[in-house]
């Protein structure tokens, strides 16, 4: 038997939550799967977390999200008497009445007591869970508390505030003990507060980020680098943390490095290196921001030769809605740059895009050349002039091909 759980589960917790090593995580999951088959309810719970997405592990973790598998393993964990499974189900708002009936505990309070004892004994994961039950007020459901027990609304609010404040020492212990995810809840407490009960104290979040970064947690090296680069505009201080995060496997760190070399404030501007940075992120998981940046760079020839085909390739991998890639994709499909010309598709992209010189250029060419619409050179020139006023050179060049006749009608030269 391990210190807090079975030997397999104790080892898996270390490999899943106290580091961000994909090889160790995959080996841990395999061991958990075997232990779950042999009836280990705690192994079932931690397998459920593996299937539940990056919010339960880390960005670029090696597990495919599978809601059905996660729920099935969670149910199994509760039925097999996993106290952490019960608290996990409460936190996920998934402890259904039939799951309650299947658990061998007298109450959810009994399950909480088991986890609490392990937290007191020093288990960072359990400390994190107990902290969450306080901060997210799961203790109300666990203890079957209600406002009716209190003499006034103020007394009820005061009690809930005290519960949330009780989360802080648990988050601090868990984070200090190696539980990387505890830093998220710890930061959220200060960054977001909680309604009218806990006011935000955002200035207290940065020291927590730095604490995690100095402990070598990739997620927090990235978070701290991001804070320094974008909130503090201190690119010089941000760069080493971003590089450490990226080299430790948190690929979003390369986005920060790329942005810093793009800006050229703390280092000499190097656009070819910027492309290398974004490609390291975009090639794994198709990060929308990196894909969009690469599309822009290949479209304009920033740091590389103009390559419309690669621009289209990357821009189409940008999955964020209403993002700025639509105007560039609209131009490419409208004019057949790097792809099969498709004016209808180009028009659709341009209409979805936000106002920009590129959108005006695309609409100008569409009307002036009658691409997917009835030709209207006058209307096209209006759009082209808007793009030209914003110093978009292709629009200036396009305008040289049209002139107004003596009768005030716009024609091609």
Image (cartoon, grey):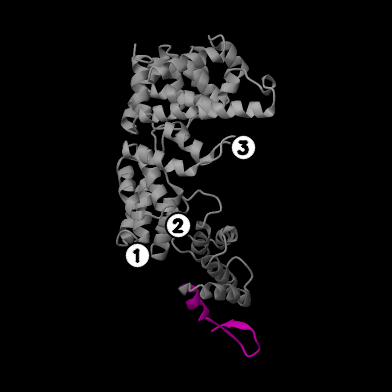
Residue on which the image places disc 2: 312
Looking at the image, which is closer to me, 111 or 293?
111
Task: Write the residue at 45% across / 19% down.
Answer: 44
- The residue at the point 43 percent across, 17 percent down is 42
Where is residue 175? Give x, y as percent: 39, 31
Q: Position of residue 180 (x, y in %)?
A: 39, 32
Say which quarter of the image contains residue 181.
top left
Residue at the spot 34% in from the left edge and 58% down from the top edge: 261
Q: Which residues are magenta?
A: 394-413
In the picture, measured across the screen, residue 297 lies left or right of residue 273, that is: right
Find residue 339 and report its horizontal and vertical position in percent.
46, 59
**Mark 3 and mark 2 in contact (Cβ < 8 Å)?**
no
> In the image, is 296 to the left or to the right of 406?
left
Q: Secondary structure at mark 3?
A: loop
Real-space Cα distance between discs 1 and 3?
54 Å
Q: Residues within 10 Å of mark 3 (few under 14, many from 20)?
A: few
Q: How packed is label 2: few (under 14 Cα within 10 Å), some, or many (20 or more)?
A: many
Residue 124 lies, with reference to residue 189, above or below; the image says above
Vertical arrangement, residue 184 with respect to residue 359, above or below: above
Query: Which secondary structure, mark 1?
Result: loop
Residue placed under numbered mark 1 in the picture: 305
* Quadrant in which the N terminus appears: top left
User: Up-down: is 359 above or below 144?
Assistant: below
- At a point 55% along the width and 74% down the height, the residue shown is 384
Mark 3, residue position: 196
Instruction: Report, in whole angstroms, how far the alpha carbon at label 2 lies from the one at label 3.
Output: 47 Å
Is residue 18 shown to the viewer in this render? yes
Callout 2: helix, strand or loop?
A: helix
**Mark 1 surroundings within 10 Å by alpha-carbon count, few (fewer than 14), some (14 through 19), many (20 or more):** few
């Amino acid at each position: 038997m391990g210190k807090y759980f079975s030997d397999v589960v104790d080892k898996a917790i270390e490999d899943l939550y106290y580091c961000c090593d994909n090889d160790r995580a995959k080996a841990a999951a395999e061991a958990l799967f075997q232990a779950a088959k042999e009836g280990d309810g705690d192994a079932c719970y931690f397998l459920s977390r593996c299937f539940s997405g990056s919010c339960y592990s880390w960005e670029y973790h090696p597990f495919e999200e599978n809601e059905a598998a996660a729920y099935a393993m969670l149910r199994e964990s509760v039925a097999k008497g996993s106290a952490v499974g019960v608290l996990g189900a409460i936190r996920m708002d998934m402890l259904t009445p039939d799951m309650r009936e299947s658990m061998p505990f007298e109450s959810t309070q009994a399950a909480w007591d088991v986890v609490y004892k392990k937290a007191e004994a020093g288990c960072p994961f359990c400390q994190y869970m107990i902290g969450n039950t306080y901060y997210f007020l799961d203790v109300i459901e666990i203890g079957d508390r209600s406002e009716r027990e209190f003499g006034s609304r103020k007394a009820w609010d005061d009690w809930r505030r005290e519960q949330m404040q009780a989360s802080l020492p648990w988050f601090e212990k868990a984070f200090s003990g190696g539980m990387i995810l505890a830093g998220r809840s710890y930061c959220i407490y200060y960054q977001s507060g909680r309604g009218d009960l806990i006011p935000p104290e955002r200035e207290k979040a940065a020291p927590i980020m730095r604490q995690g970064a100095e402990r070598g947690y990739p997620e927090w090296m990235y978070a701290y680098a991001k804070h320094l680069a974008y909130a503090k505009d201190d690119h010089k201080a941000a760069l080493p943390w971003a590089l450490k995060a990226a080299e430790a496997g948190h690929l979003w760190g390369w986005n920060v490095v790329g942005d810093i070399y793009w800006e050229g404030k703390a280092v000499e501007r190097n656009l070819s290196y910027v492309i290398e940075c974004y490609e390291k992120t975009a090639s794994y998981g198709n990060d929308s921001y990196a894909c969009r940046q690469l599309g822009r760079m290949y479209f304009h020839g920033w740091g590389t030769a103009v390559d419309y085909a690669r621009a289209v390739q990357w821009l189409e991998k940008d999955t964020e809605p209403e993002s700025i890639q639509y105007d560039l994709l609209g131009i490419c499909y409208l004019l057949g740059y790097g792809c099969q010309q498709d004016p209808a598709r180009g028009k659709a992209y341009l209409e979805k895009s936000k106002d920009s010189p590129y959108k005006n250029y695309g609409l100008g060419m569409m009307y002036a050349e009658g691409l997917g619409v009835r030709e209207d050179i006058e209307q096209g020139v209006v759009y082209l002039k808007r793009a030209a006023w914003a110093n978009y050179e292709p629009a200036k060049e396009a305008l040289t091909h049209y002139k107004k006749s003596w009768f005030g009608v716009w024609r091609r030269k």
